[in-house]
Amino acid sequence: AQSVTQLDSHVSVSEGTPVLLRCNYSSSYSPSLFWYVQHPNKGLQLLLKYTSAATLVKGINGFEAEFKKSETSFHLTKPSAHMSDAAEYFCVVKPPSGGYNKLIFGAGTRLAVHP
Amino acid sequence: EAQVTQNPRYLITVTGKKLTVTCSQNMNHEYMSWYRQDPGLGLRQIYYSMNVEVTDKGDVPEGYKVSRKEKRNFPLILESPSPNQTSLYFCASSLLGGTRDEQYFGPGTRLTVT
């Protein structure tokens, strides 16, 4: 069975410092992996997507994530946090499906950015 | 503008009073899905549809119904809402298969059942 574990429910950083949001997945097959962001009172926006091309994936707003098969990890990073990055972040796995588009969400990590 | 819309955005209702949350997308997507979001649980899938007249249960379907009579619309129906259905609901849509199958989410509907 597929599952996603986000290792931190809350992360707090100072503006201008690096961001690391950790995600581990379990999947019997090579999945697609996503990071979505949810700003307060907003819907979910796709940050980036991994689909077995390059292991380092660049997304919007300066975020990137590295797929490490040996560690079954897909951690999200950003070199320098901005106040506008404060939001909830979801790591998501989509098992290979042959047409069934199910997403499996992690529990989320709330990122706080302090001045 | 490509988007998924949901209505209403906020709803307070009482136990047992039937309600419908509408979802519409303008991207000609085959796949549509409903999720509920609860604190500490992420998003869980309620129902999904792979095309018109094709729907199936997700992980938490109890107490919900859906229909897909048109490609663009996928309403969520609560025939007899209960307080445990108080949650934040999201509709999503996507193409099926290929490399462009990322899901697009609506803005959410916050439902409170008293």
Image (cartoon, rainbow, N blue to C red):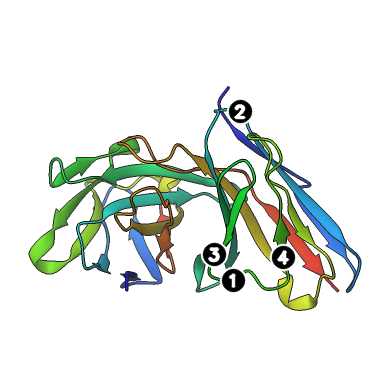
Spatial CA distance of label 1 from label 3 is 6 Å
Q: Mark 2 lies on which chain?
A: B
* Residue that label 3 marks: B58
Q: Is mark 1 on a helix, strand or loop?
A: loop
Q: In which quarter of the image is residue A1?
A: bottom left
Mark 4: amino acid: Tyr
Residue A76 % position (x, y): 26, 54
Query: Given contact means CB atoms under 8 Å apart, are the residues at marks 1 and 3 in contact?
Result: yes
Mark 3: amino acid: Gly
Mark 2: amino acid: Asn
Q: Specify whether B9 is left or right of A115.
A: right
Q: Which of A44 and A98 is in front in this view?
A: A98
Spatial CA distance of label 4 from label 2 is 24 Å
The tag earlier along the polypeptide, 3 or 2, is: 2
* Residue that label 1 marks: B60
Q: Mark 4 lies on which chain?
A: B
Q: Residue B26 carries which label?
A: 2
Q: Do labels 1 and 4 share a chain?
A: yes
Residue visible at 34% across and 72% down in the picture: A8
Residue visible at 23% across and 45% down in the picture: A51
Spatial CA distance of label 1 from label 2 is 26 Å
Mark 1: amino acid: Val
Query: Given contact means CB atoms under 8 Å apart, are the residues at marks 1 and 4 in contact?
Result: no
The tag earlier along the polypeptide, 4 or 2, is: 2
* Residue that label 4 marks: B64
